[in-house]
């Protein structure tokens, strides 16, 4: 089946950067994701002033939503264009600085200070650099990770979570023999074995 062939498929960082350059970003949701609205209470669990992590964040508008609710948002994304578009499209001033621990990486931070976006590969991050999080919004992230890197990705995510953090994960259920994406099919059984 195609699940078998997907296992070996790789989308390179270069290909992602090209998608951004070409405006080939059908995954971006201008209006934000209904499932975050629906499950917001699960994510927050009555808490306020949380640190929320957006892995493989693109220019997700949900980052603005959560920041506006008083949470502090950290994202990571390899495309600098995506991050600059994010700030520009929301009219948010930001400043840019190198990340001493990661060569070539940049951190773009809203002037108000509550949105901090790392321009580098997620695999360059660690809790000593970004700290730990009370909540995670994983939409278009695990499903975009190359299948061979899934375990590494999930192990890293575990190290970035506080004890009582909530992790909202969006995946898409479809017949991988009929559809090629979104990028990779992650069956529920695999999610259970990855996260334990
Ligand atoms: N979560 C976003 C974007 C999903 S598309 C949303 O909901 O809209 C996946 C994104 O991951 C792309 O923007 C791509 O550039 C980025 N990406 C791919 N590999 C990455 C990596 N190793 N580290 C950080 N970002 C990566």
Image (cartoon, rainbow, N blue to C red):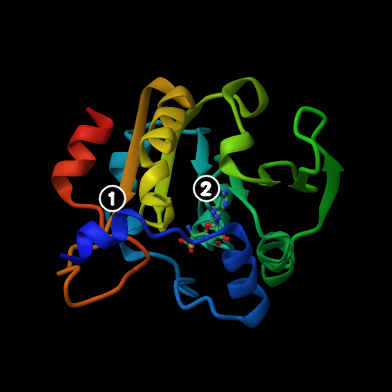
Depth check, front residue: 96 or 147: 147
Depth check, front residue: 119 or 9: 9
Give the Cα separation between the discs numbered 1 and 2.
15 Å
Other-residue count near label 1 (Cα within 10 Å), few / some / many at <14 / 14–19 / ≥20: few
Q: Quadrant of the C terminus?
A: top left
Instruction: Identify the residue at horizontal 21%, vertical 66% (top origin).
Output: 2
Instruction: Identify the residue at horizontal 63%, vertical 63% (top origin).
Output: 14
Determine the secondary structure under disc 2.
loop
Report the number of numbered marks: 2
Other-residue count near label 2 (Cα within 10 Å), few / some / many at <14 / 14–19 / ≥20: few
Point out residue 25 in the picture as x, y percentages from the top left corner: 52, 76
Question: Disc 2 designates what residue?
Answer: 69
Point out residue 100 in the picture as x, y percentages from the top left corner: 82, 30
Q: Quadrant of the N terminus?
A: bottom left
Question: Disc 1 designates what residue?
Answer: 39
**Mark 1 touches mark 2? (CB < 8 Å):** no
Point out residue 105 in the picture as x, y percentages from the top left corner: 76, 43
- Residue 64: name its quadrant: bottom right
Above or below, 45 against 148 in this view is above
């Amino acid at each position: 089946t195609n699940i078998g062939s997907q296992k070996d498929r790789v989308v390179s960082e270069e290909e992602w950067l090209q998608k951004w350059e070409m405006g080939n970003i059908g995954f971006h949701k201008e209006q934000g994701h209904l499932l975050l609205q629906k499950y917001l209470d699960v994510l927050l669990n009555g808490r306020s002033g949380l640190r929320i992590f957006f892995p493989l964040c693109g220019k997700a508008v949900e980052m603005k939503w959560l920041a506006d609710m008083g949470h502090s948002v950290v994202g990571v994304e390899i495309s600098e264009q995506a991050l600059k578009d994010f700030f520009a499209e929301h009219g948010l001033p930001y400043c840019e600085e190198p990340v001493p621990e990661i060569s070539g990486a940049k951190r773009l931070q809203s002037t108000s200070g509550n949105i901090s976006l790392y321009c580098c590969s997620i695999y360059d991050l660690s809790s000593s650099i970004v700290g730990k999080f009370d909540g995670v919004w994983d939409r278009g992230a695990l499903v975009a990770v190359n299948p061979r890197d899934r375990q590494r990705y999930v192990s890293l995510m575990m190290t970035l979570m506080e004890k009582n953090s909530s992790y909202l994960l969006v995946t898409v259920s479809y017949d991988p023999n009929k559809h090629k994406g979104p990028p990779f099919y992650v069956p529920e059984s695999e999610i259970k074995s990855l996260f334990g």
